[in-house]
Image (tube, rainbow, N blue to C red):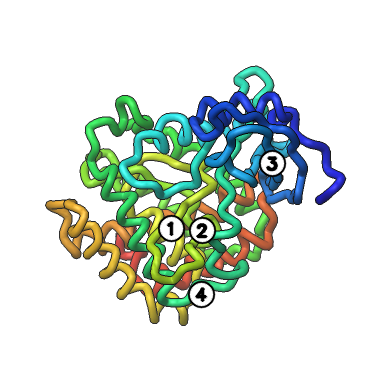
Amino acid sequence: MTSDPLPAAAEPARLTAVLRDAGVLGDGRVRDVAVESARNTILSRIVRLRVAYDGEAAQAPRALVFKTGLPDWMTAEWNGGRKEVAFYREIATVMPTQLTPRCFDAQWDSETHAWHLLLEDLTETHQIATNWPIPPKAADAERIVVARARFHAAWWDDPRLGTSIGTWEDPADPQLAIFATEFARFADRMGDRLSPERRKIYERLIAEGKRLNARYHTHRNMTILHGDAHIWNIFLPRDAASDDVRFFDWDGWRLDVATDDLAYMMALHWYPDHRRRHERALLDRYHAELMARGVAGYDRQALDDDYRLSALWQLAIPVWQAEHNIPPLVWWPHFERIFMTLDDLGCLDLLA
């Protein structure tokens, strides 16, 4: 146990009501809640809670995870947590398969921008594949892309996309002007550490952005993306025979081509040797799972075409991260790795 204060949203009376509403407590009540551990990530605070009960509570969780924002990120400009709360309220509750931790409470205050989630604790049954920044073993990577395909297929061209679930980007592509402004600041910050050749690639990407976005604006062969799909946002079951993979940290979800998640995971985060040895086989396995899950009219070449385009757009990630004060320890390796990927896959041909 730690000396960290108990969050107000996890006080026994409040927690009793939440768990009863979730149907896991019955006539029992929460007697005591203790903070077992607490840690900060770059954007949030994670608190593990140990819960004790009085009365009938056989189905009630003995441990929970409380997630909330850090004060510097709970602002109108950042709006952190809002989308993750919306995900657990609007999407996780209607998913056909359980691919996320169960959420018992999801709250976001539009006035104060305070938010929190109360999530299932998977510590005993699941684990992260590997310590950051080491990539996963091949078998774990396969489990991840298969689960990713299951999630993507469940929402593939769903008629609710862009209507009751999520929104499509403006066809005028105003985000390209934002990207151009952010890149100008990024280039000034980098100085001569940004070569003239790389500067021209960024300038060409911005100039050709509207043409490249035509694929997105078809709104065909689209799904819900995680949006921050690196392997450290995934819980793998400790049982190697289980397929109970869970994805967490959903504040970046959006509607887009599925390959954006795959390119973010491999093209952006993996160094060339590891990526070259595993990328093709994992894309094959992902596509096979899509087909097995009923996705039609999306052949293997279409996946490759989308993946190359998604890899090209990963150039925007280090610019965005630097703009939003993500530590250089994160964005600088992304900046170097993505150029190596673009060379390997011939992505720059898309700018011709």
**Placement of the C terminus among the 4 image quadrants:** bottom left
The amino acid pointed to by label 3 is: Val
Location of residue 284 (image quadrant): bottom left
Q: Mark 2 highlights which residue?
A: 235
Q: Mark 4 highlights which residue?
A: 271
Residue at 22% across, 32% down? 159
Please name whichever residue, 43 or 11, is drawn nearer the observer in this view of the structure.
Answer: 11
Q: Mark 3 highlights which residue?
A: 51
Residue 48 visible within the image: yes
Measured as percent of width and height from the top left, residue 185 is found at: 62, 46
Figure check: 314 above or below 71? below
Location of residue 94 (image quadrant): top left
Please name whichever residue, 6 or 181, is drawn nearer the observer in this view of the structure.
Answer: 6
Looking at the rendered structure, which numbered label has been put on residue 245?
1
| 3D distance between C-alphas at marks 3 and 4 | 42 Å
* Label 1 close to label 3 by CB (< 8 Å): no
Measured as percent of width and height from the top left, residue 297 is found at: 12, 52
Residue 197 visible within the image: no
Closer to the chain start, of discs 4 and 2, is 2
| 3D distance between C-alphas at marks 1 and 3 | 25 Å
Closer to the chain start, of discs 1 and 3, is 3
Query: Which-is-in-front pick, marks 1 and 3?
Result: 3
